[in-house]
Amino acid sequence: MKVRLQALAVLSSALFALVFLGAEKPRPRVEPIKARIGVISIITGQGAGYGEAITNGIRLARDEVNARGEVYIDLKIEDSSGKQEQALSAAQKLIHSEQVVAIIGPTLSNEMKVVGPEANASGVPIMGTSTTAKGITQIGKYVFRNALPESQAIPASIGMAVKKYNLRQVALLYGNDDVFTKSGFDTMKEVSENRKLRILTVQEFQKGQADYKAQLTKIASLRPDAVFCSALYEEGAVILSQARKMGIKVPFVGGNGFNSPKVIEIARDAADGLIVATPWFVDRNDPKVKAFVAKYEKAYGKKPDQFAAQAYDAFHIVANALKAAGAADRDRLRDALAATKDFDGVLGKFSFDAERDVVMEPNVLIVQGGKFRVFQ
């Protein structure tokens, strides 16, 4: 009995030591980095299709980031309606009243030309997800973009078209009242000249125009091998429809504004033969892409386009930079963003160059049978 009591005493002492002395203390709960991020996008008016895709992509990424618990982001979304003055007013509200740590947007290069300087002067990092005109990041050191610029995309699409169709002479058509479409035209003209293509005519139009008969009649009379067109999707889709009805069957090489399912939705069969360059391909055989597409379809009932994908990746890039910065501090976030290298997103590997611009390879796609497909 004495031996048994001694054994029980030893066991009790061991249990006491294990429970009260040797047990690992619970780790303190790490609070997430909390930040407020502003979004400026076209929610209403012309170009709302772009804004819908962008905000959908951002909200999906926000939900994923907040669920992980390392960073918690409060979104403040403002509608610009695609207008410079409204975009600037939205930026001022987000910067000074909402005290956001960063801004994603605006949608158009026109808008970034006024919003970018405001954000830069205020020391607020701003990320363009769809602003592809030349000179965007040269606005200042707080201005970034993950949108593939026209200066990289258009040479790729024209190069593939020249090789495939043995192009010799082309017609150029562009919107002359928009920074983005003018920038796209400038690149198309430069690439055409560098490739020794004969430019038969340059035709212009304005945003919101409905009838392109005069421009297309001139183009048709000159019988080009292809038409290079810089337009937003509303005008671009109508141009395609009217061109096909007038018997212009040659390939169209479009700028970034054509990279939307809305073009196919509006132009229908007339969109066949449209060639574009984009960092995004919805049917790419990549687990990350498939997972993103499935989540997006479940949330919104349709597949994501390039603008949704770019916005989705942009939000994750900002969230990763916030984590690296260690606090919701504008200057520290700017430096962490600038250091982004080999981010592995749904668009592929992404880095910023020294000018805070995009380093990545485009995909060249063609519309066939109502779908964007790899152009070969």
Image (spheres, rainbow, N blue to C red):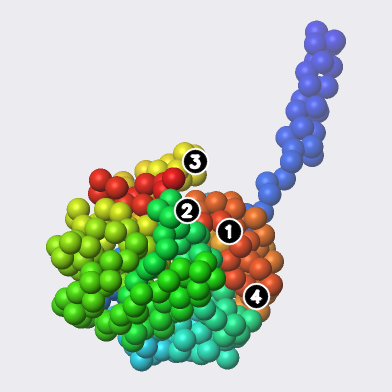
Amino acid carrying mark 2 in the image = Lys
The spot of residue 168 in percent (x, y) is 42, 63
**Tag 4–tag 1 contact (CB < 8 Å):** no
Q: Disc 4 and disc 2: Cα gap in Å?
A: 31 Å
Tell me, for residue 163, which label it has, or none: 2
Residue found at x 19% / y 79%: 214
Q: In the picture shown, does residue 288 fall above or below 249?
A: above
Tell me, for residue 170, which label it has, or none: none
Question: Which of the image's four quarters has the N terminus?
Answer: top right
Give the residue pinned by disc 1.
360
Secondary structure beneath label 3 = loop
Q: Disc 1 and disc 3: Cα gap in Å?
A: 16 Å
Q: Residues within 10 Å of mark 1 (few under 14, many from 20)?
A: some
Give the residue pinned by disc 4.
355
Secondary structure beneath label 1 = loop
Q: Disc 4 and disc 1: Cα gap in Å?
A: 14 Å
Q: Disc 4 and disc 3: Cα gap in Å?
A: 29 Å
Question: Which mark sits nearer the N-terminus, 3 or 2?
Answer: 2
Secondary structure beneath label 2 = helix
Q: Residues within 10 Å of mark 2 (few under 14, many from 20)?
A: few
From the viewer's side, name the closer residue of 284 and 346: 284
Amino acid carrying mark 3 in the image = Asp
Q: Residues within 10 Å of mark 4 (few under 14, many from 20)?
A: some
Give the residue pinned by disc 3.
286
The spot of residue 333 in percent (x, y) is 63, 72
Residue found at x 46% / y 82%: 112
Q: In the picture shown, does residue 152 fall above or below 142?
A: above
Residue found at x 37% / y 57%: 275
Question: Which mark sits nearer the N-terminus, 4 or 3?
Answer: 3
From the viewer's side, name the closer residue of 300 and 155: 155
Question: Which mark sits nearer the N-terminus, 1 or 3?
Answer: 3
